[in-house]
Image: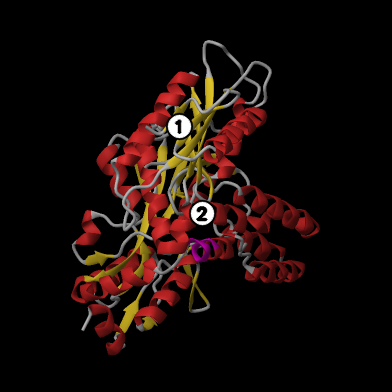
Amino acid sequence: MSMGFQVKAAHPKITYCVDPDWFPFEAIKDGKHMGISSDYLKFIASDVQLDLTLIPTKTWQDTLDKLKSGECQLTPMLNQNPARSEFLTFSDPYFNSPNVLVSQKNQPFLKGFDQIGNQMVALPLGFRINDYIKKNHPEIKTKTYPTVLDGLLAVVDGEADIFVGSMLSTNNYIQQHGLHQLRIAGWAGPEDNLRLGVIKSHAELIPAINDALAKIDEAHKLAIYHKWNNVTVIDNTNYQLVKQVVVAGTVLGVLMLIYLWMVKRYNRQLHLQNDELNRLKAELTKSNQKFKQLSTQDLLTGLYNRYYFDMALAEESSRFDSDNPIALIVIDIDHFKKINDQFGHSTGDLVLKQFSNLLKELVTDMDVLARWGGEEFVIFSNNTTIQQAHDKCFDIQQQLKSTEFPGISVITASFGIAALKQNETMSTCFQRADQALYKAKETGRDRICIADAAQAVNTAG
């Protein structure tokens, strides 16, 4: 009898805790678990047949304490680190998210932790990024706060200069609480590789949980991501409080002033007059649309996505310098549809991940590597000649021949290359590279073709 069958037959009763205030990843609202982790956990519980009971907590640190004591036996979304590994066993990672630096708008952009200098950094209590900074940047001054919102408000009030946290949750709080004086000032440290954790006495659940996670295809993951990333949570209670304060103010104006002082730290919207509410809603909608575009990473492969690559091309569209040549490479995995049809989409996803890792090993820091869509990838190579771009493609081609892919053995790819010409737009250059790729596939695949060449200049040897 397999371990997965034993777990399903047992219908184990499991208590679990979540971060009560980390939207859109997870949160507790009206006693219910909501957010991205809630949908993943519902799928896992159904597949493994777990009987789950939510234990509400007040803070993330409270959740960690209950996991240590065994009162909670599972938590659906967190990073793995040595301290947590002492009392938890972790599943495979199933959701990646970058961390960002947040500052007031009048502060300069930052390339990373090395530029923080003597500034005070606010951190959410119990998050993995705290240990990372302590270990890798001990010179940085830090101060911890119970929640992400408390840390952001510390930057608003000038108690701290910079906040470090997840891009998705930071965007959510900026929109929800109207913190328009804040902006994302740079990328911060390692990205979050989020997993499900269970206490060690229930470690036997992990294989079945990993099997369930592997069944969630990319389309399902994207649907969950868009479902919760498009939700703007506005606390309607705050508007009711505004009405109560106005009514009370007609009787006792002094109480109005006292009330506004008490709630200042928790709701910046109370400073707006009633006749400005429509303007606030319009600004929130505009900000929401802007922050939706900040997700620049492909969820499956971890590479940059098409949106980010388009931005990179736009930045370079007006530049041509014969001393700094630019090359565009378009790559397509050969016969990828057959792989999906014959082996299934799960195997196809594994091929895309392994192929992406191979590309990351072979490109340089001067390159911008992105997944363009499906099985197609693009490389923007700065300070690269046509010959150097060809050599890079040849290296990838040879590495593919010596790489075994799960259940498939060897795969091949086709390559199209174009060099940016004087007075040519990046869009036109990309079209020429794409036409070269089409020529490579049309002439037999597993080939490298250069745009405007009379024939395929290098076929697979």
Q: Nearer the viewer, residue 446 or 393?
A: 446
Label 1 Cα neighbours within 10 Å, binned few <14 / some 14-19 / many ≥20: few
Helix, strand or loop for the magenta stretch, by majority: helix
Whether residue 127 is situated above or below residue 432 in the rendered picture: below
Disc assigned to residue 288 = none
Q: Pinpoint residue 308: horizontal percent, then vertical percent.
A: 56, 40
Q: In the rendered view of the protein, which quadrant contains the C terminus?
A: top left
Q: Pinpoint residue 258: horizontal percent, then vertical percent.
A: 61, 61
Label 2 Cα neighbours within 10 Å, binned few <14 / some 14-19 / many ≥20: many
What residue is shown at x 78% (from left), y 58% (from top)?
A: 278
- The magenta span reads 218-222
Image quadrant in which you'd find residue 5: bottom left
Q: Nearer the viewer, residue 13 or 151?
A: 13
Q: Residue furthest top?
A: 323
Disc assigned to residue 111 = 1
Q: Pinpoint residue 208: horizontal percent, then vertical percent.
A: 29, 74
Residue receiving disc 2: 168
Whether residue 382 is situated above or below residue 412 in the rendered picture: above
Q: Amino acid at mark 1?
A: Lys
What residue is shown at x 44% (from left), y 48% (from top)?
A: 98
Asked whether the viewer can see residue 77, the reply is yes
The question of residue 342 being in magenta is answered with no
